[in-house]
Amino acid sequence: MSRYFAVITIILMLGMVLTRALLMKRKGIEAMNFGKIDKTDFLILPFAFFYFYIVFAATFNFPTVSTQEFFHSEVISWIGAFFCLAGLLLLLWSLVSFGQSFRVGIDKDHPDKLITSGIFAFSRNPIYVAFALILLGQFLIFSNFILLAYIVAAIWLFHRQVLLEEDYLKKHYGKEYLEYCDRVRRYL
């Protein structure tokens, strides 16, 4: 049952982000800026699709690269499902807190105001924390070496993106952003 929750998590995660971007597009705000600054961002897509396939394959017994797991425990799988749920709730809270400032990628042409309230009063990067919780949860559900490699790679990619965003935010918002950084942690 927890394996189905992992699939539902992916669907809900993608659904929340894409729905938010489409709703903003209807208001004339282009929220999807993925790959506009760094075209190598598009290299992430095939790896993301492969990740989704691995989760779906493990759940629905499709052909896959490996079925070997480090461990299998129903209790740990449900702890993983809890992490997935926590990640989804954090993602939802982040999207609501972002308001009209939500963007996928850096939008140098149409930046909005700096968001420091809601979940952003506790973490400067709650969406990345949410994604990390989801990845950790799915690893606990499936516990294979491929998902472990994805966690390591994703954490590196998330941190790389956070550093790029922070550099932009420092330049764009200046002292306001630096004061925000003094009050609120980068992740947790």
Image: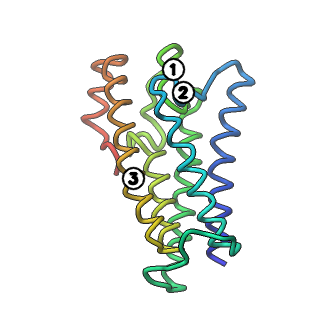
Residue at the far top: name it: 109
Residue 8 location, quadrant: bottom right
| SS of the residue under disc 3 | helix
Report the Cα–Cα distance between label 1 and label 3.
30 Å
- Disc nearer the start of the sequence (1/3): 1
* Residue drawn at the location 46% of the way across and 44% of the way down: 119
Amino acid type of the residue tagged 2 in the rendering: Ser
- Dots 1 and 3: beta carbons under 8 Å? no
Mark carried by residue 153: 3
Amino acid type of the residue tagged 1 in the rendering: Asp
In the foreground, 27 or 108: 108
Residue 127 image position (x, y, % from top left): 48, 45
Horizontal relation, residue 149 to residue 12: left or right? left
Mark carried by residue 159: none
Give the mark toward the camera: 3 or 2: 3
| SS of the residue under disc 1 | loop
- Disc nearer the start of the sequence (3/2): 2
- Residue 160 versus residue 145 in the image, above or below: above
Q: Mark 1 points at which residue?
A: 112
- Dots 1 and 2: beta carbons under 8 Å? yes
